[in-house]
Image (cartoon, rainbow, N blue to C red):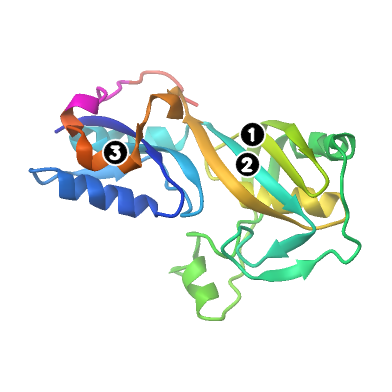
Amino acid sequence: MNGILLIDKEPGISSFDVIRRIKHHSVEKLKIGHAGTLDPFASGLLVILLGRATKTMDMFHKMRKGYSFTVEFGYETDTLDPTGEKIFIDTDQHNFTPTEIKSVLLSFRGEQTQIPPIYSAKKVKGKRAYDIARKGGTPVLEPIKVNIYKLEHISGEGSQHTFEATVSSGTYIRSLASDIGRALGSYATTTALRRTFIGDYAVTDAVPSKLLDRIELADKLLPTPTWKENVM
């Protein structure tokens, strides 16, 4: 089996739970890869690569990614998402208008550096940052270069606001939301996150992960792409 599966991951499961479902559902031994995982609390597009399509993994990792996400201002958790413990609380209980938020967004567009969350898969001296953090350590993560191609405020009042972003590979939306909160003189945590596209592949064309046990995988396979140009 060779090709690409587009999966719409449901919140509450890991990306590797999806991969395990695919392996369990298949009658043959699959060579399988992916074009970037999603945090368990997040939903949206997973691009699963099967067979010869796994050779395109590096190209997929260079593609732009699109997200919609909801931010709650006023506190920050250790994971920068709703699964963590609150570690910083804005005692002034700032509520922001769309105008106030939009006034700081311009500074986040374009090339910049970003510090990944301590609860991330980034390696620190050969160990995953989240493994160090879960054991009570404080991983020291180096800033990484990212590019925010698009960042727009979509809706919201008070403490909860929704955004859309198009970003370079390796960008952490959780860190971006936290940085927006700091720029406004408060704190922020990403409470909902959905990946909407990777390159030309959109979540609207994906199979819901809840339906994986009810479909024939071969019927949903897209052909392995052949790229001769820059795919970013």
Real-space Cα distance between discs 3 and 1? 28 Å
- Range of the magenta residues? 219-226
- Find out whether the residues at labels 1 and 2 contact each other: C-beta distance under 8 Å: yes
Q: Secondary structure at mark 2?
A: strand
Question: If you read the primary sequence from the N terminus, does the residue marked by circle 1 or circle 2 appear first?
Answer: 2
Say which quarter of the image contains residue 207: top left
**Does residue 104 lie above or below 201 as drawn?**
below
Residue at the bottom extreme, as displayed = 136
Asked if residue 184 can be seen in this view, the reply is: yes
Q: Nearer the viewer, residue 208 or 55?
A: 208
Q: Which mark is residue 230?
A: none
Q: Secondary structure at mark 3?
A: helix
Residue at the left extreme, as displayed = 27
Look at mark 1 in the image and give the residue it sits on. 165
Residue 111 position, x and y percent, is: 69, 37
Residue at 28% from the left image edge and 48% from the top image edge: 19
Neighbour tally class for label 3: few under 14, some 14-19, many 20 plus, Cα within 10 Å = few
- State yes or no: residue 224 in magenta: yes
Question: If you read the primary sequence from the N terminus, does the residue marked by circle 3 or circle 1 appear first?
Answer: 1
Real-space Cα distance between discs 2 and 3? 24 Å
Look at mark 3 in the image and give the residue it sits on. 211
Q: Quadrant of the N terminus?
A: top left
Image depth: mark 3 or mark 1 in front: 3
Q: Nearer the viewer, residue 177 or 230?
A: 177
| Magenta stretch, overall SS | loop
Look at mark 2 in the image and give the residue it sits on. 69
Say which quarter of the image contains residue 75: bottom right
Residue 60 position, x and y percent, is: 40, 34
Neighbour tally class for label 1: few under 14, some 14-19, many 20 plus, Cα within 10 Å = many
Neighbour tally class for label 2: few under 14, some 14-19, many 20 plus, Cα within 10 Å = many
